Image (spheres, grey):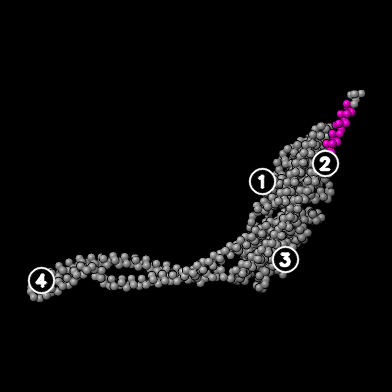
Amino acid sequence: MRWFLCLLVLAPFAYGDDLLPDERRSIARDPIYGQALYSLHAGEYDKALGFNYQLRKQGRKGYGKILDIHEATAQLGLGMSQHAQKQYKRLLSDSRVSFLPAPARAQAWFYMAKHFYNKGLWASALTAMRKVNSAHMAADLKDEYHFLATTLELFKGKPEKADKHILAINPDSKWAVYAYMNLAVSYTERDVHISKVEAVFNKALLLTSNTEKPEALADKINLMAGKFFYATGRGRSAIKHLKNVSLDGAYTPKALLTYGWALTEQWQYHDALQPWYMLKTNHSALNQDVQETLIAIPHLLEKLNAKVMALGAFDYATEQFDDIYRQLGESANRLNTGKFIEPLMKQQVPDRWGAFETVDLSLPNHPDQVYLKDVMSQGYFQGELKSLRDLHVMRAQLKFDMADLNAFEQMTKIRRDEYNIIKKEAQVSKHRAHLSNLKSRYKKLLTRIDIAFKNPDGSGLASEPEKDQLATFKDVSKQIGQLSKRSSLVESSYRDRLRRVEGVLKWTLSERYNERKKQVSQNLALLENKIRQANQQYKAAQFAYQVAPKTFKGFKNKIKTLNRTYQKQLTKLDRVYDKQREKVGSIVKVDIKKRQQRVMDYQLQARLAAARLFDETSNKQRIVTGEVRQ
């Protein structure tokens, strides 16, 4: 229980199923609280807020501050950062919260600061970060804490405090690399001496081996250093770093472009052509670095006094800029017709949304992915796109609920029709009559069986000749008795003979009795099973007849009310979705317009330069011709 709030604030950075520990302070047998807690665990933050509101309406006795914590967590999950911030600050700043120990409080402040750092609310993040007591931080979080504190202190103008945090980071940790990178950026912005800046960049390069992708990170650091040294007029230092950028990475185009400019600054014009030609031939013309190269190469050829080649390069650049402008126009049309937004929305996971669910920005096989990656890398665009994704998911869920409601309405109609059919055909009465008939037959059959099997000796099953033989045996037995009285006849020998003859017949009757009784028992079991099934069918039909009205009566008005409510919500949601869609589209439209304007500027420069070169070459030709004539 004491670590509850720490784990609660940590939870949104994990997954929904690990959101909260078991809660022992809940009221026993409270289904609404159970639903609220389950929704929070499952990541269904909107449902959790709804159940939380119901609990508050019923009264908060027995929950303490648990409902406040649940509400703040759900608000974080839905991206309601400002509301959650107020809630957490009130909870964490309250020293009367006795169940929150110092380590839990420190980690709670840390995770809240991390959340606001990721959201771009750096002032709030720094305020929360300064509340963290590093002495109580867990060992696996200390380096990350010092990195975030370093970053926030640097960008808020507190380099002295940032230096203390950097020194506290373990050099073998990946966070040390990122801390030194941010320190280098801070040095470049504060005009620190160039030797210190280079030392920090070199230190960051040495520490890249501790990261998951050292090659990519080293490329990024070398590009940052190269651009900085080129901007400050130190071309040799820039060349040293830019040469170390790989030729097949994400930072290759920018590095090749800057590398060419750095060589140009050092008057190495022939060498500068090589990286620019590599950039132009190996990358798409929609890349802005390639576009700058198209206008830079002919200027460099002009400096090499290859004016005819430069004139041809300017003409080639003009044609390329026309084609690029056309492609950008086609991209704008795709954006207006939804061929950019809709594929992006369709590839999102339908059941995952909220502030902590990332947006899939892959755009596979999309014609605009070359330059859209630059737009998508912007945090502002990703935030707006995440809001659009959430609206898209909510709209899809609302439509799914409306489809379920329509299916339920159809089901009520089917149930009503079935009920009317049962009522019209009097199926319950038929089942009752069938059951009564079976019971009557069963009763009569039992009476006949009792009569037939009354005598165990089987005489009841004897045929007429066999009955005559049994009667004859009785008469013979009487005659033997009478003869034994009149004469000296040995009675025992005659009776033995009679018993043997009579025994054969009785044995036959006994076997027949046992066989018939076995058959009758089997037939009775089958009949009893039929009676049992008929009885079950009768009870089921009777129950269905009684319950069937409950499946359709009283739902008509509720369905209409819900359908009307859903329709209103969908109408409002569609308006908000269209506005947000237009907002996201406008970001891309502005970017496309800027790119088109830049292409037009390049094209104008190329045409003016081509015209100037044409005039210069023409004048030179006329001058040479005149001198020859003279």
* Residue 519 visible, this angle: yes
Q: Answer with the quarter of the image where residue 536 lies.
A: bottom left
> Label 1 amino acid?
Asn
Q: Nearest to the eye among marks 1 and 4: give it.
A: 1
Query: Seen in the image, is 186 located left or right of residue 102?
Result: right
Q: Nearest to the eye among marks 3 and 1: give it.
A: 1
Determine the residue located farthest toward the right in the rendered image. Answer: 630
For the stretch drawn in magenta, the main secondary structure is helix
> Label 2 amino acid?
Leu
Residue 271 locus on image (x, y percent): 78, 35
Q: Nearest to the eye among marks 2 and 3: give it.
A: 2
> Label 4 amino acid?
Val
Residue at image coords 25%, 67%: 510
Q: Is residue 418 above or below residue 282?
A: below
Q: Which residue is mark 4?
A: 490
Q: For mark 3, does the 10 Å Cα neighbourhood hold few (<14), some (14 to 19), or many (20 or more) residues?
A: some
Query: Seen in the image, is 456 located left or right of residue 283?
Result: left
Q: Does the magenta-highlighted stretch encompass residue 618?
A: yes
Determine the residue located farthest toward the front in the rendered image. Answer: 424
Q: Which residue is mark 1?
A: 365
